[in-house]
Image (tube, rainbow, N blue to C red):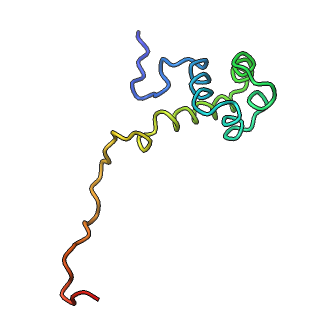
Amino acid sequence: MQDSQPNNPLHGITLATIVEELQAHYGWDGLAERIDINCFRNDPSLKSSLKFLRKTPWARSKVEALYIDTFHDPSHDPSHKPSHKPSHKPSRKPGPWGRR
């Protein structure tokens, strides 16, 4: 039986890749600002961060959520088209009362 998770944005992405991409995007200081954990603040490295995150589920969840928000949130994708139409278009014509 094959484990298929088509709706999971983290499927097939290793924790190492997640941390590497976030670090490249934000830098260690930026990561520490967004997620206040010592492995990003005090002498950060990929190795120490992975060691901590693998044994600390709450911290790993925060890192995974940041990754999704940063790289998989449709609102950050310039090619993403909203699924709803605007409620109305502003009219360029003056109303029956004319211009003020």
In which quadrant will I find the N terminus? top left
Measuring 41% from the left and 11% from the top, which residue is drawn there?
2
Q: Position of residue 30 (x, y in %)?
A: 66, 37
How many numbered callouts? 0
In which quadrant will I find the C terminus? bottom left
Judged left or right of residue 20, residue 28 is right
Q: Position of residue 29 (x, y in %)?
A: 71, 35
Q: Position of residue 18 (x, y in %)?
A: 57, 24
Please identify the residue farthest to the right as the structure is shown: 42
Please identify the residue farthest to the top as the structure is shown: 1
Q: Quadrant of residue 48?
A: top right
Above or below for 99 versus 72: below
Along the viewing direction, whichever of 31 and 60 lies nearer the viewer? 31
Measuring 22% from the left and 90% from the top, which residue is drawn there?
97
Q: Position of residue 53 (x, y in %)?
A: 70, 24
Judged left or right of residue 77, residue 94 is left
Above or below for 85 versus 97: above
Measuring 21% from the left and 88% from the top, which residue is drawn there?
98
Above or below for 29 versus 11: below
Measuring 72% from the left and 22% from the top, which residue is drawn there?
49
Along the viewing direction, whichever of 39 and 25 lies nearer the viewer? 25
Judged left or right of residue 44, residue 65 is left
Q: Quadrant of residue 22?
A: top right
